Amino acid sequence: MARLLEGRYARCQKVIVVCDNLNTHTRGAFYAAFEPERARQLVRHLEFCYTPKHGSWLNIAENELSSVTRQCVAGRRIGDITTLREETAAWSTDVNASQRGVDWHMKIEDARCKLKSVYPSIKA
């Protein structure tokens, strides 16, 4: 992050960081990794945008990026940005025409085990 903020995005007034709710994705993580002055310089340009805790749309975006990598560009060397844009646009058009959805489902027993922190505990 520091390399990006001090390099590619050095001239940006604000950089929006989209992340999940992992406890390391905070401004405080910068203060744990860097001296306070450098951490302050880095975080003053950041705006954190957190995804919902349950059913994150970020997971859907990650799935799509994984799909485009496997189905469109894997094992190929694409020599210029124009060709890359054409290839990914064709892939995207084809995928969107099929109207795929995301089917989030989990059996109740699995949910109670994997998400036990969300379910209230009943004491008899």
Image: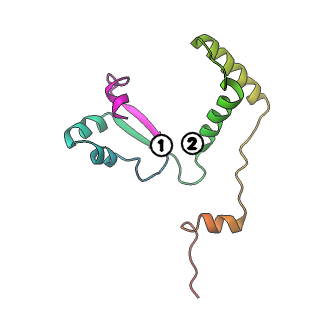
Give the x, y percent position of residue 45.
32, 33
Q: Residue at x 29, y 48 (%)?
A: 32
- The residue most toward the right is 98
| SS class, disc 1 | strand
12 and 35: which one is in front? 35
Please tell me whether residue 73 belongs to the stretch shown in magenta.
no
- Toward the left, the furthest residue is 37
The CA distance from mark 2 to mark 1 is 8 Å
> Circle 1 sits on which residue?
19
Q: Is residue 92 visible?
A: no
Position in image of residue 67 (x %, y %): 68, 34
- Magenta stretch contains residue 9: yes
The residue that appears at 37% across and 29% down in the rendered structure is 4
Say which quadrant the C terminus sits in. Answer: bottom right
Closer to the chain start, of discs 2 and 1, is 1
Residue drawn at (46%, 51%) of the image: 22
Name which quarter of the figure residue 105 lies in: bottom right
Is residue 13 positioned above or below 18 on the image?
A: above
Residue under label 2: 58
Q: Quadrant of the N terminus?
A: top left
Residue range corresponding to the magenta coloring = 1-18
* Residue 109 location (% of width, % of height): 70, 68
Q: Answer yes or no: do the residues labelled 2 and 1 have beta carbons within 8 Å? A: yes
Camera sees residue 122: yes
Q: In the image, is 20 to the left or to the right of 48?
A: right
Q: Is residue 76 above or below residue 49?
A: above
Within 10 Å of the Cα at label 1, are there few (<14), some (14-19), or many (20+) other Cα atoms? some
User: Element type at marker 2?
Assistant: helix
User: Of 15 and 65, which appears nearest the observer?
Assistant: 65
The kind of residue tagged 1 is Cys
Q: Residue furthest front?
A: 75
